[in-house]
Amino acid sequence: MFRALAPGGRLAVLEFAIPKTPLIRSAYQWYFKRVLPGVGKLISRHNAAYAYLPASVGAFATPEQFSNLLRQEGFDDVRAVPLTFGIVYLFTAVKRI
């Protein structure tokens, strides 16, 4: 992403995350592991539909790790904004001039 942006270019990444608040995290993980795969199967008629998503989100870097990675790659003004109780994060950054 860094290489593709012009100097001063802005990056925005919207990514799922595991909420930090225990009650929200528990409800989210229950929904994610028990409800979402069933809904995906019902809609798509495919057994594995959406079953990959909880593992994918669990394997993604934490907001702090991803922000640090962006900084290491040369981005400035890195921000991680939690949305929907921390279920989703909007990461923004600017390529150094």
Image (cartoon, rainbow, N blue to C red):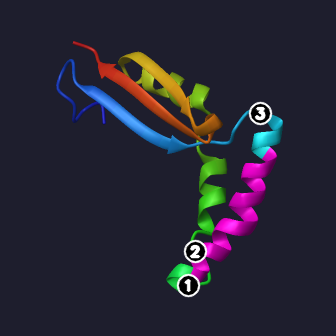
Residue 3 relative to residue 28: left or right: left
Residue 72 appears anywhere in the view: no
**Circle 1 Cα neighbour tier, 10 Å, few/some/many (<14 / 14–19 / ≥20):** few
Residues at badges 3 and 1 in contact (C-beta under 8 Å)?
A: no
Instruction: Tell me residue 45's x, y (percent).
Output: 54, 87
Q: Distance of mark 2 from mark 3, alpha carbons?
A: 26 Å
Q: How crowded is mark 3: few (under 14 residues within 10 Å), some or many (20 or more)?
A: few
Q: Which quadrant would the C terminus be assigned to in this image?
A: top left
Q: Which residue is drawn at 73% across and 33% down?
A: 20
Residue type beneath disc 2:
Gly
The percent position of residue 30, horizontal first and vertical second, equals: 78, 58
* In front: label 2 or label 1: 2
Q: Where is residue 57 in the image (x, y as percent from the top left)?
A: 61, 50
CA distance separating discs 3 and 1: 32 Å
| Residue on which disc 3 sits | 21
Q: Is residue 30 inside the magenta stretch?
A: yes
Q: Give the farthest residue toward the left.
A: 6
The label shown at residue 29 is none
**Secondary structure beneath label 3:** loop
Up the image or down, 72 lies above or below 90; here it is: above
Q: Which numbered disc, 2 or 3, marks the residue that appears first in the sequence? A: 3
**Residue that mark 2 sits on:** 40
Marks 2 and 1: CB-CB under 8 Å? yes
- 13 in magenta: no
Residue appearing at x 31%, y 36% in the figure: 1
Residue at label 1?
A: 46
The majority secondary structure of the magenta stretch comes to helix
Residue at the far bottom in the pictured view: 45
Q: What stretch is highlighted in magenta?
A: 26-42
Secondary structure of residue under mark 1: loop
